[in-house]
Image (cartoon, rainbow, N blue to C red):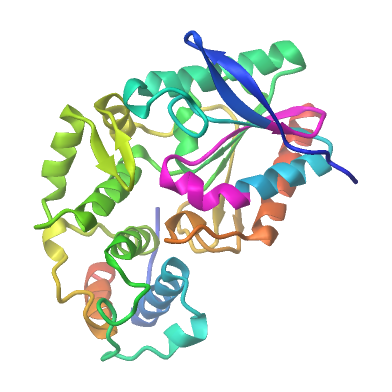
Amino acid sequence: MNAGEIAYRNYRWRGADEWLAEIGSGPPVLIVAPLFEELNRCRALIAGVMRGLAGAGFKAVLPDLPGTGESLRELGDVAWEDWTGAIGMLTFDLTARSQMPYLASFRGGCLLEEQAQAAGRWRFAPAAGAALTRDLIRARQAVLPGRPRAEELEAAARAQASEFAGYLIPPAIFAPLRDAQLPEADVVRTVRLDSDPAAADLKLAGKPLWRQSEPGNDPALAAALAFDIAAGVRACAA
Amino acid sequence: MAATFDADGVDATLRSVLSDVLGLDRARVNGFGADTELFGSLPEFDSMAVAGVLTELEERLAIFIEDDEVDGELFESYGNLLTFAKAKALA
């Protein structure tokens, strides 16, 4: 089945155009990608999931968050509320265009759900904000001389923009990320790798691509994730 | 989050983490002995990789690794890292 090509279009956020990618036609699935370098490492995986969903008769939508990807905004000019707000706005926009979307979030993307309205929520390997900032701080410690203490780097990041793994993250993102918990929701389906001891509705074989230094891919995992998302969308519609 | 391990389980988990995070062939990692040198000897094990190994270990062993527990010796050899992981996970 020809699922078509990935198409790019703009969405409007706070007076400026931002970008999203979409592929396929049918019930919309809004994908909220991992944050910062984890997105780069998972890019091929996410693309595989999107093509799988398109092939299964869904419309997969992947936005660039304001200040990331092709956005013309600087990350330093963006706040956490821009991210949660943009995701929320996009769910309302998709609802108006066709129908309420299914939300499929990956890793730190799961933390951005709070303003979204969704037919169902699906999360892959969700992580609390504190775990993600701990990882960012470790990456920063690795490249700074003298191995400054984590507490010092965190305090500094809450006060001024700091560079983590190539991303200049402002306090308006770092601080809320650090404190972010997974939003409560009535119905959430959680999928994790089988190497992850945390609770999940489904565990799948695969490597944590978001942890590897080099971006990688796992087509079998992408197919399994797309299959599970599709099943979730159909179950919500039933 | 519940993760219970015995000594062999910690060893297997550590090898799996090194293989997954560093992108090393699993058979090669299974051949690591106590004296196998890591940081400084394996090109894949650079300071950025250290961050990924620490965080992944925390997650899989359900432990918390403090700043001052990480010193230069920890990653010198597989044996050092395994001893540390066992002490944290089996405490």
Name the residue located 32 percent from the left edge and 28 percent from the top edge. A173
Q: Visible in this render: residue A231?
A: no
Residue A185 visible in this rendered orientation of the protein: yes
Observer-nearest of B9 and B24: B24
Q: Can you give x and y, in whole percent of width and height, for residue A184 in the image?
A: 47, 28
Q: Residue at x 33, y 32 (%)?
A: A177
Quarter of the figure that contains the C terminus of chain A: top right
Relative to A120, is A115 above or below? Answer: above
Task: Name the residue furthest right.
Answer: A1
What range is drawn magenta here? A22-45
Judged from this view, the residue extending furthest toward the top is A15
As drawn, A77 above or below A138: above
In the rendered view, would you say B52 is above or below A31?
below
- Quarter where residue B48 is shown: bottom left
Q: Which residue is located at x 50 percent, y 81 percent?
A: B26
Residue A230 place in picture, x, y as percent: 75, 40
Say which of A166 and B88 sits in front. Answer: A166
- Residue at the spot x=33%, y=58% of the render? B55
